[in-house]
Image (cartoon, rainbow, N blue to C red):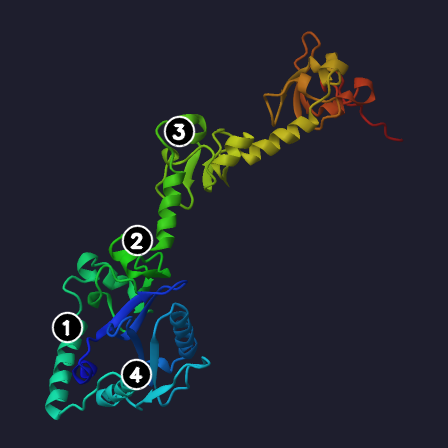
Amino acid sequence: MLVEAASGLTVELDYRLRLPGRSQDRFDLYLPEPAPGLFIDLDPAWTHGRPGSLERDTAKTKAALAAGLDVERIRSRELPPVPIHGFAHYEAGPGVDPEDWAESVGFVLRRRGLSWRPLTPADVTAALTKGAQLWARAVAGPEVSAVDVAPRLEQDFIANLTNPGKTPDRMPPGCNDVCLWRCQKPDCGHEWKAVLNSRALAGRGCPRCGHARVGAANSRPGPGASLAEVNPTMATELIEVIDHPGWTAFDLLPMSNKKCQWRCPETHCRFEYPAPPSRRTDQSSGCPRCARRRTVAARVRPKPGKSLQDVHPAIASELLEVIDEPHLTAKELRPSSVKPCRWACSKHGCLGRWKATPDQRSRRGGTGKRCPVCHPPRKSRTQP
């Protein structure tokens, strides 16, 4: 306001412009007259003395000059000049006394042949009062803030990275300030950077939670495509989906990679084991304990023509049962098997019953472990 009062020129504050190859830049003062206009940046030490500030100020000034803009910078005496060859260096301060900084702007304008008149105490008071009113309205924030549009932003907000200290209740919904946010869900707490308007107007939230929702939605089956509907037999073996409590076979795809707990349907087993549905569907795998039992059984089964029934039919005719595996027959036993069996004498009228392995019975031409009734054990002879 002091510059406007002393120069008689129109002054626009916080003028925003997008330079080629850059995001939107902000200039403290813009004087549109005389054309094509003058851009002035004011660099007090308290905002431009931070790490990286000189590099940012230099890059912005170079981009403005390359775009053909008429730009000047007035920097606090505590700061080093912007290192651009041929670029004029103006100082103000130290401190932020408005009259001191306005006088530095006046020096720049007078060098350019523009008018500048000394201000009376009344003029200074009026200009500062007008500036204070404008600042009060700016501090009060917009009539409709981002929080009015999206109240949840106030809880997620951590910091304004573009304009430190400015909060969502003082920013309009369309503001493009980059802010830092934190998800408030107890099981998340993820922090991320996002432009304010992408949250207030586009309704975007925590990206981690969004990815989880999309992944869960993509993994859910459509009508008629669930594990329960495609493979109901396997679905009856499901105990739980380990990482998703409450899910059932209707929530799983047959080729899902989600880890599940299963129970063997065989009454003699009922073993529980973890596996994803995809492994069971793709490889047709089931209970690992039963699979091992089948593998062992396959290794001990006789080859064609080599079973107890084929080699020793007479002995095979006396087999009652395999004690540990009653479902096995003489056709499924090797003559050398060591499985304990029960036998019954085939001699007419003999009631002999005894236990022995096929190996014991088939050794020595079939004379081992014969019927104890028909062939009682011989008494040992003792020397007189």
| Numbered disc 1: secondary structure | helix
> Image point 79% across, 18% down: which residue?
366
- Badge nearest the viewer, 4 or 3: 4
Residue 204: image tag:
2
Q: Position of residue 361 (x, y in %)?
A: 75, 21
Classed neighbour count for the residue bearing mark 4: other residues with Cα under 10 Å, few (<14), some (14–19), many (≥20): few
Position of residue 24 measured from the top left corner of the image (x, y, whole percent): 33, 65
Whether residues under marks 4 and 3 lie with C-beta atoms below 8 angstroms apart, the answer is: no
Query: Farthest residue toward the front?
Result: 113
In the rendered structure, which amino acid carries the disc numbered 2? Arg
Q: Earlier in the sequence, mark 2 or mark 3?
A: 2
Residue at which label 3 appears = 225
Counting residues from the N terminus, which is met first, the one under dot 4 or under dot 2? 4
Q: Which mark is residue 137?
A: 1
Q: Would residue 164 be visible to someone looking at this image?
A: no
Identify whether 230 is placed above or below 58. Answer: above
Which of label 1 and label 3 is nearer to you?
1
Q: Quadrant of residue 184?
A: bottom left
- Categorize mark 2 by other alpha carbons within 10 Å: few (<14), some (14-19), many (20+): some
Camera-nearest residue between 93 and 224: 93
Depth-wise, is mark 1 or mark 4 nearer the camera? 4
Closer to us: mark 2 or mark 1?
Answer: 1
